[in-house]
Amino acid sequence: MKIAVASEGKTVTEHFGHCQNFNIFEAKGNKIIKSDSIPNPGHRPGFLPVFLHEQGVNVIISGGMGGGAVSIFNEKGIEVVVGACGGALDAAERYLKGELVSTGSICHDHSHADECGE
């Protein structure tokens, strides 16, 4: 299983599309066996869900995300977990333990990414 965490360095970002990087964690069972970080290749409508799907990602974790991205991830069979905060590794580990639950925090106005709410 591959878990991508939209991040600013090693911290979960508030808005998926404008993140600095994606921390990618590969898990076997409930243990992370490999981690990597890839830079965000750029925010364009519909691009990032397809890009992460091509990377083999099964789960995306972020603080918030636009409804269009959520829809594309759902079409690709990728689980979306929003409302996360704190460290990227911690978020991935909490997801694997079943302790990280999506809050449904969907962004409706991309011009104010820092104001995404539930």
Image (cartoon, rainbow, N blue to C red):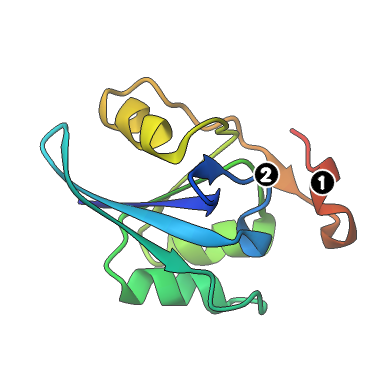
**Sooner in the amino-acid sequence: mark 2 or mark 1:** 2
Determine which residue is flagged by label 1: 114
Three-letter residue code for mark 1 = Asp
Q: What element carries label 1?
A: helix
**Neighbour tally class for label 2: few under 14, some 14-19, many 20 plus, Cα within 10 Å:** many
In this rendering, is residue 87 above or below 24?
A: above
Q: In the drawing, does residue 104 fall left or right of residue 98?
A: right
Q: In this view, does 13 lie to the left or right of 108?
A: left
The residue shown at (37%, 37%) is 89
Please state if 81 lies on the left or on the right of 13 as rendered. left
Residue 75 horizontal/vertical position (percent)? 44, 65
In the rendered structure, which amino acid carries the disc numbered 2? Glu
What is the total number of numbered labels drawn onto the structure image?
Answer: 2
Identify the residue at image location x=43%, y=76%: 51
Q: What x and y, as percent, mark residue 19?
A: 62, 59
Asked if disc 2 and disc 1 are in contact, CB closer than 8 Å, the reply is: yes
Query: Is 91 in front, or is 70?
Result: 91
Of residue 33 and residue 97, the one placed in the foreground of this image is 33
Residue 18 is left or right of residue 115, and the answer is left
Image position, residue 21 (x, y; %): 51, 61
